[in-house]
Amino acid sequence: MYSCISLLKYLFCMSILSNCMADRANDVQKALSYYKINETCVFNETEINSKTIKKFPKCDRVYGIIFIDSNTDLTVFQLKEAFKYMKSLVGGLMIEDTTNLTNLNIFATENSSFWIACATYGVFIRNNTQLVDYSILDKIHLYKPSKREECEYRIENNPKLDVSCEDNNLYTYTYLQVTGNLRDCGCQGTIRNVSSPEHYETCNTLYGGLQLNSTSNISNLPMLRNVITMKGLINIENTSIQDLSFFQSLTTIKYRNVESVVINLRNNSQMTRLGMGLPNQEFSDISSVYNGQEYTLVNFENLHGDFCLTISEVIFYFWFCTLSVKNFHAKLCDEQDPKHVICHFESLKSLPNNCDVIIGNLIIDAGDEEFISKVKATKYLIGTLIIRNTNLKKIDTLSELLLICSFNDAVPLVQIHSNKQMKKANLGRVINLVTGGERIAIIQDNHPDLFKSRECDLFPYLYTFVNLTYIGGNCGERVNITFSIATPLSIISAFILSSLAYAINF
């Protein structure tokens, strides 16, 4: 009977091994079929040992997946000798289930970095009982053809490995999985439920962003209050969360994807505030690990009808971090901010002289020329800009303006029209324009020399890559601008766009 049980165990193990090798063979073929390969530099074996190593090509670029496991009967020195010509690996790397491997110094990295292209596979270092040294990972760089995605990178269940991700090349990865080692770097935010709150309570770095939906357990989210750095994107949809105040210590969000929605808040019907600690922390930052000049979005969509942003949040996310918006279902919170001189616009004549934040549509109209100096100190306009019917020859008193953010998607961001003497218009210090509606500037019926010799561009130093569309007679086809006897504050009224005409009533 015992012999039958042993036989069954043997057959079961062989079946698992056979399936494992079949999976590996499929992974290898998938990797090889993805790239345009050099046939003489292909290694398509499913494991590395003293027999297969003889087939390893002597090329600086090798195509295949290197599998090092319990069947690898080679020392680190022998592996490094076999790999000494290789400078890059196109495919992937797996090192798992070894019992005698103490370090990963198997690649020639003394004089250069080692590159792994991993469009279809990744890098896996797991279940290695004696592994203690991972320093070579500082010289290994992973890349995909598209920067929008990261290679799968896992360092798991190596009981003697003390992993730090902040002082080497691992710092650049945002979806790194490091768990079950002697020491791990940070916590994983990609899990749907924060199932081990005591672990997260001491966590300073969250890898993989935070992904929450209707099935997530949100009761333990306050345990994230000590997280300082987020690696990845925040995606919260279909929850009953009211705000993100559990990120009270958060100072940094680092992401790798370009054209990313770095904060996606969608269909959270009870969410009334953003509430993260970022705007209140010194040295806070939201940026790409590679390039801060990327098109990065926030999405505020279908939240509670009272969802609002504070002035500090508007300035931090849209000026300091230069984020753009995908959907902007939000309004400005009705509260003061002691850090700023805040003025609500009624007329230029009644406006104080020292406003660094103006709330409302800034209208400079006929007769306002003598008061134009009042906006000389203004840095942030939370509304739209309208300059009309003046005898101004140029716009130069808005020289300190840095941000225009409009919560009203029915009105163009900028209107400069019917200023017969205006020959120059430049708002050169503005670095971001934010609106949930169409990004439109109407330039019309000003002096014929305005933008005559150059392309229409009010903001030559915008830091974002979101276009502003210029329309009107000074910049192309004329549009119809109709006036009513309504007061300037009723500009929220109709803004109708068609292929032939633009109608603005105020």
Image (tube, rainbow, N blue to C red):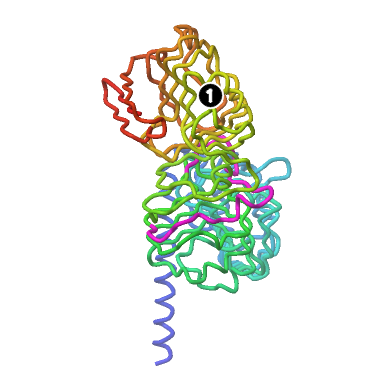
Residue at the extreme right of the image, as rendered:
110
| Residues rendered magenta in the picture | 268-297
Q: Main secondary structure of the magenta part?
A: loop
Q: Is residue 279 visible?
A: yes
Q: Residues within 10 Å of mark 1 (few under 14, many from 20)?
A: some
Query: Does residue 130 belong to the magenta stretch?
Result: no
Who's the residue at 48% across and 64% down the image?
A: 191
For label 1, the residue is 459
Q: Is residue 167 left or right of residue 227?
A: right
Q: Nearer the viewer, residue 79 or 381?
A: 381
Q: Quadrant of the N terminus?
A: bottom left
Could you say whether the residue bearing mark 1 is in a helix, strand or loop? loop
Residue 391 locus on image (x, y percent)? 50, 12
Q: Quadrant of the C terminus?
A: top left
Q: Quadrant of residue 470?
A: top left
Query: Does residue 288 belong to the magenta stretch?
Result: yes
Q: Amino acid at mark 1?
A: Phe
Please say if 61 is above or below 426: below
